[in-house]
Image (tube, helix red, strand yellow):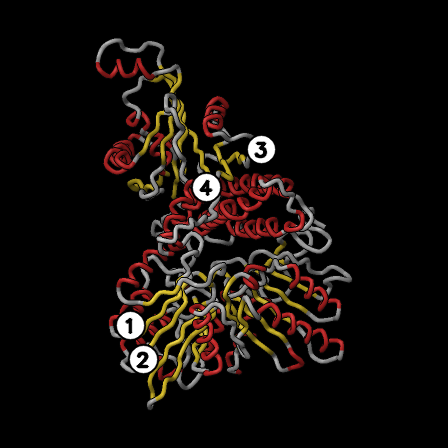
Amino acid sequence: MSEDTTNQYINRELSWLQFNARVLQEAADDTVPLLERLRFIGIFSNNLDEFFKVRYATIKRIDLAGKDGKNVLKGTTASDLLERITKIVIRQQTESLKTITTIKRKLEDHDIFIIDENQVTPDQDAFIRNHFITKVSPALVTYILNDLEKFPHLKDSVAYLAVKLVLKEKIPKEGRISKILQQTIKEKIYALIEIPKNIERFVVLPEKEGKKFIIILDDLIRYCMHINFSIFEYTNASAHMIKITRDAQLDFDNDLSKSFIQKISSSVKSRRDGEPVRFVYDHTIEKDTLDFLMEKMGIDYTDSIIPGGRYHNRRDYMNFPDLGNTELVYQPIKPLAIPGLSLQGSLLNKIAKKDFLQYTPYHTFSYTVKFLRESAIDPKVKSIKITIYRLASISHIASSLINAAKNGKNVIVQIELQARFDETANIRYAEQMQREGVQLIFGVTGLKVHCKACVIEREEKGKLKRYGFISTGNFNESTARIYTDYTLFTTNEAILKETNKVFKFFEINYKINRYKHLLISPHYTRSSLLKFIDTEIQNSKEGKPSGIKLKLNSLSDYDMIDKLYEASRAGVKIDLIIRGICCLIPGIPGMSENINAISVVDKFLEHPRLFIFKNAGDTKVYISSADWMTRNLDRRVEISCPIYDEDIKIELMETFDICWSDNVKARRLSKDQDNAYIRNDKAKIRSQIATYEYYLKKLGN
């Protein structure tokens, strides 16, 4: 058994690192287009940044509080876990650097060259100098560190070049500049250059003889150091990248005179002052420069010190230019129509007759936007209620809601201002919607609102009829192109009446409603799921059809895991598709021998939550916003929605089975935590491609 496991559970943080290792596997996969491999490096790096800001920072707070955390961390102390995380990250960073080197070498076979400052040709010199002087230099912030009384505050996740200038021995004795120099100059000057975030990281140079050249902004700055430090006379200059990652925990003040928006906004601004939780540096940096920086910054070797490569903020590779080389990127798929649901006619009239399922990005997200746009101008629509967790930077959803308010509709928006790392965008839209007459609700004290739901009320024949949709993902046009998610459009009165109760709960928190159809966190999801599993256990014991199939982002709640173990021991067959964290250990005799688990990492990010219970042949199927994590079950408002339409129920089970059959991009989750690909003698099934073909076939193509 892996050292990352106890006898019953895999540690949550170490399981997450294994998920990120699967992302890194995609970057190393020769079958993935080269520029996509670079982008997977960016995703790997971005994931790691967020992990340190949130999870590592949490464990560090436990450690600094003098607690060992064994009860929370299941069998390991906080200090031991911090040490193990650092070792794993160093190993993964080393692998990622090797992968980048391989990718760059292979790009040269396609006449794409990523050059550094030492490879600049005379033909490129003028272009680079001009680009630096006109676009880069005005945006640079340079700190001369030697005589600063206080070390500058390093921004979270911003890359800096740590510069050392070795000065000439003789200093000019005349002239205004020389007097300044004589006052400040030492044998060595240490400086920091902040890499601007508002300038493209990858500078495309003029093409030559069919060859394409790119220089990374960091190297362009290195090449032009003599321009940036022209007032100093030096014999040698070196520049090495460093980066600080800070604790992203939000802290709120208790000023009663501030609105909730003001408090969140203030807290987001103060996040930049969070405690450092990781210091990454170029492993080739000179020791004296590193010692100088660490002393000035108050960092010691007990912190998470990660020796890295020449470049940090490799998350920027997510936006690496494609340079017109279509064969080096994934071919885009054209989002499909939903059979029987035209975007040209009235969506509401169609949904009134039957339920429809939207599965993005295989289906176009335009149905969600069209639903709201139609509702915004339909004179019969009287009210719109919707939850918002993460919005796109340019949001047609927000525009439609504002349009509805301007048309006199009663628009109520529950917006989650604490959606981590999207707080600023949500605050901006919240203020805009508030100005335009949209009624905002800021959730429930102590609970994040993570459910994805919308209910509209339309006057028909003198009565109000409800229409709505419930989703597993955010109402976000940008992520809908790369996240797989289910959305159910329905007029089922039982479902929408209970969804409306959730909105009432946002306004009247002390009243806990009863639900017959929906599973609602934090009140009923856990208890309902436990009952469903108990039913499967009883059915198995009685020889009735039993079985559980789950598709989740994460499975980390220990009580739910224990219940699945109990079901396994009772003979219930359990199939798990878990993209990210999985603390359950499958396939252990006497504990989980009837549980199999896989993870699929591919072109699209697998995001839906789907629960399937065999239920003695009367199968129960739910789509949900909730993972099986303690926070989703007990500390968030979540909706799990039953599927009553038999055709949609079959569709969901069939798409689950397609994913389960993947033998190209699926990895088997096991006690060994080795991320082994599933390989067998069956015909190759890459589930995301097969799912698209499944929906093409439904359209008759």
Residue 200, visible in the rendered structure: yes
Query: Is mark 2 in CB contact (under 8 Å) with mark 1?
Result: yes
Q: Earlier in the sequence, mark 2 or mark 1?
A: 2
- Spatial CA span between label 4 and label 3: 18 Å
Note whether 309 is above or below 542 in the view shown: above
- Spatial CA span between label 3 and label 1: 55 Å
Q: Name the residue at the left extreme.
A: 175
The residue to which callout 4 is attached is 274
Q: Crowding at label 4, few (<14), some or many (≥20) Cα neighbours within 10 Å?
A: some
The answer to which quarter of the image holds residue 666 is: bottom right
Amino acid type of the residue tagged 4 in the rendering: Gly
Give the x, y percent position of residue 122.
29, 30
Q: Earlier in the sequence, mark 2 or mark 4?
A: 4
Q: Quadrant of the C terminus?
A: bottom left
User: Is 226 on the left-hand or right-hand side of 340?
Assistant: left
Q: Of helix, strand and loop, which one carries label 2?
A: strand
Query: Is mark 4 in CB contact (under 8 Å) with mark 3?
Result: no
The residue to which callout 1 is attached is 404
- Spatial CA span between label 2 and label 3: 61 Å
Q: Earlier in the sequence, mark 4 or mark 3?
A: 4
Residue 208, label in figure = none
The residue to which callout 2 is attached is 381
Q: Of helix, strand and loop, which one carries label 1?
A: helix
- Spatial CA span between label 2 and label 4: 46 Å
Give the x, y percent position of residue 63.
60, 41
User: Is 536 on the left-hand or right-hand side of 687?
Assistant: right
The residue to which callout 3 is attached is 302
Q: Name the residue at the right extreme.
A: 590
Name the residue: 39% across, 14% down: 187
Closest to the observer, 491 or 598: 491
Note whether 468 is above or below 387 in the view shown: below
